[in-house]
Amino acid sequence: MNMIIDHGFPYHTKITGILKKQSVSNFTKKGLGIMRITISGRNIELTDGLKAAVEDKLGKLEKYFTPDAEVYVTLSVEKERQKIEVTIPVKGHIIRSEQVSNDMYVSIDLVEEIIERQLKKYKHKLIAQKQNSSYFQPEFIEKDTEGEDEIKIIRTKKFDMKPMYPEDACVQMELLGHDFFVFVNAEDDNVNVVYKRKGNTYGLIEPEL
């Protein structure tokens, strides 16, 4: 069985160093402060128009975030798929969204709307930890928002995790008919996750401690 395993981003996401083209943009909008946006590209030329579109759309998020927040944006093209991925790390959480369409400008428009909905929906969960409040604007923290959907865990499953290598974990995942599999990596005794990707390949998620 030939396996291609993609080592995905760790829990504390590292972006730099794995992308082909990178542009860093600092800008101020509506006097709310400076939000640092790092724009990277895969298989796409980062034109001034694209960078301006990203800055204009994601600049709207400054009403939620303080200058302590950093936004990582990756634009990529694969055949007809024009994809944008946005990652915003805050302590204890990673806010992430990706959108795909046949037009990059449409994808950019959609991703900002999704992040706004996430922020409003899970506001109280995000700022429940004191260290997270420094990432968000006081106006956002103090403003009343619509009630959040309660998160209900309706099932708990426990299982014995024996140390194994990622390739063996992929085999076990296939045997169980699952799309992901949690295991203890025999190489370092850390808990890892393998998951299915397109093209009969696999991804590996490992923690950064």
Image (cartoon, grey):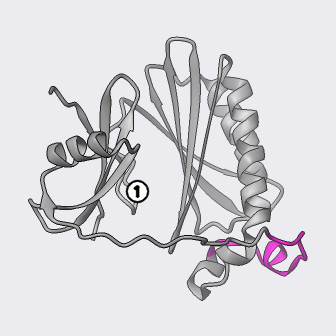
Q: Does the image show residue 49?
A: no
Q: Which residues are magenta?
A: 135-148
Res 162 → quadrant:
bottom left
Q: Dividing the image into 4 quarters, which one contains the N terminus? A: top left
* Quarter of the image where the C terminus is located: bottom left
Q: Residue 152 is drawn in which quadrant?
A: bottom right
The spot of residue 130 in percent (x, y) is 61, 88
| SS for dot 1 | loop
Amino acid at dot 1: Thr
> Residue 110, position in %: x, y?
74, 36
Give yes or no for residue 140 being in the magenta stretch.
yes
Name the residue at 67% across, 76% down: 125
82 relative to 18, above or below: above
Residue at point 13%, 63% (across, down) = 163
Given residues 47 and 169, the one toward you in this image is 169
Residue depicted at x 71% and y 63% = 33
Residue under numbered circle 1: 13
Nearest the camera: 155 or 57? Answer: 155
Furthest residue in direction top, as rendered? 79
Q: Residue furthest left?
A: 187
Is 73 in front, or is 185?
Answer: 185
| Residue 122 visible at all | yes
The one nearer the camera, 1 or 79, is 1
Coordinates of residue 178 in the picture (x, y in percent)? 39, 45
Left or right, residue 159 beside residue 164? right
**Residue 206 belongs to the span the image colors magenta:** no
Residue 62, given in percent of the width and then of the height, sits at: 74, 59
Judge whether 25 appears above or below 43 on screen.
Answer: below
Rendered view: 121 above or below 6: below
Up-down: is 46 above or below 24? Answer: above
The residue under the point 62% across, 25% down is: 48
Residue 151 quadrant: bottom right
